[in-house]
Image (spheres, grey):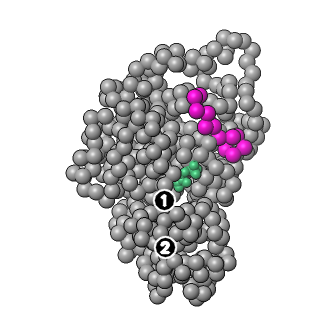
Amino acid sequence: MKNYSINTKCVQGGYTPGNGEPRQIPIYQSTTFKYNTSEDMGKLFDLEASGYFYSRLQNPTNDLVAAKITELEGGTAGMLTSSGQAANFFALFNICEAGSHIVASSSIYGGTFNLISVTMKKMGIDVTFVDPDCTEDELNAAFKENTKVVFGESIANPALTVLDIEKFANAAHAHGVPLVVDNTFPTPVNLRPLEWGADIVTHSTTKYMDGHGSAVGGAIIDGGKFDWMAHADKFPGLCTPDDSYHGITYAEKFGKEGAFITKCTAQLMRDFGCTQSPQSAFILNLGLESLHVRMPRHVENGQAVAEFLEAHDKVAYVNYPSLPSNKYYEIAKKYMPNGGCGVVSFELKGGRAAAEKFMKALKLAAIETHVADARTCCLNPATSTHRQMNDEQLRAAGVPAGLIRISCGLEDKNDLIADIAQALEAI
Ligand SMILES: *Cc1c(COP(=O)(O)O)cnc(C)c1O
């Protein structure tokens, strides 16, 4: 599939059936796999041969879908996980251990912020958060002797900040560490971070990749370019023998292209077991088959809704990177010339009271915490996800009480705008 466009890879990537084989990816709903001799199976355990023995580690359905996402991102190896949370945890913990330090953008998904700042901290891993808009000097100043990885989101959920991937990649590489980018919102259809210097890409496939609100899942893709052995002292987990796995040195045996994902599967999937079910992987693949058709429509609807809101006198401001008024307009154009995603946020002039009336009046847009679904969904953080905060605290956190997040689905944009217009009328 290498020479085909991303559109074709969405449809046919990852799986090419042989003569008389199923046209669609088979669901291997089996926990285990059968062998004729113990020697055959022993070779799998020694990572001497590739194959399947237990679905906690690897499953053929999952591997076919991971192979498709790997092709879409332009990576060399990939794996599915049970959720986006698991993908980000594995991607970071595959590099870090107690005593390590992470440099991360402060503008990231709340779940990931908590994972890094609270849970991984308890594991002895430290973090310095940096403003994604910081200068190169400020970014470089965040690094320490024990920094092992840099992390950011290509388009942050829900702040919609756009990461300057080249700036972050250059700083990471100058300090001999890789850059991990969570590329959930733009998807590889609109942005491929590996092409801009990122080393590893993660996804919550729960969002646009599945796209139908059907299956929770995650993915990790390795670009295969980071030279672990060139900085062997920083990455003992990849560059020294793994006593828990027959003394294998991953970076030696599997090279730049395969070391990261092999270690992540052999160690972290073995020990934590955050496996995606083959059923969910099958559903994810159905979503991927139309990702290149859906993303442009999400973008078209997001742009139309953002422009309508910006011109409305009850709206204080609109946050959407592809609006010329947006702070990230130029950088969004550079990294995502075809647009980013369908998520738009805006603040109502009337604050909390206006937001309550607006939300109540919506007919098409459903109230959900979810985003990136085929069906438009809407959230007022002040009355839902952030309801423990008062108005003052909300403003300080950048989510004022009148802030609305709308994830534009695949409906007709005129119907969406009409729904929003009548809800604004109700204020
Ligand atoms: C939703 C989300 C996650 C977490 O993914 P889950 O599949 O819900 O575990 C991580 N990163 C981003 C950017 C997200 O939007």
The quadrant of the rendering that contains the C terminus is bottom right
**Numbered circle sitting on residue 401:** 2
Q: Amino acid at mark 2?
A: Ala
Residue 402 percent coordinates (x, y): 49, 76
Q: Which residue is mark 1?
A: 157
Q: Circle 2: is it few (<14), some (14-19), or many (20+) Cα within 10 Å?
A: many
Of callouts 2 and 1, the N-terminal one: 1
Residue 296 percent coordinates (x, y): 55, 65
Residue with the most extreme left position: 137
Question: Which of the two marks, 2 or 1, is nearer to us in this view?
Answer: 2
Judged left or right of residue 172, residue 26 is right
Q: Give the dominant element type of the magenta stretch: helix, strand or loop.
A: helix
Residue in the image at 35% along x and 69% along y: 327
Ligand 1 contact, mark 1 (Cβ < 8 Å): yes
Asked whether 358 or 338 is in front, the reply is 358
Measured Cα–Cα span from mark 2 to mark 1: 18 Å
Residue in the image at 57% along x and 17% along y: 46
Q: Circle 1: is it few (<14), some (14-19), or many (20+) Cα within 10 Å?
A: some
Residue 274 percent coordinates (x, y): 61, 37
Judge whether residue 161 can be spotted in this image.
yes
Residue in the image at 49% along x and 83% along y: 350
Dot 2 lies on which element? loop
Ligand 1 contact, mark 2 (Cβ < 8 Å): no
Judge whether residue 262 can be spotted in this image.
no
Judged left or right of residue 270, residue 222 is left
The magenta segment is 269-281
Residue 137 percent coordinates (x, y): 22, 51
Q: Amino acid at mark 1?
A: Asn
The quadrant of the rendering that contains the N terminus is top right
Asked whether 344 or 251 is in front, the reply is 344
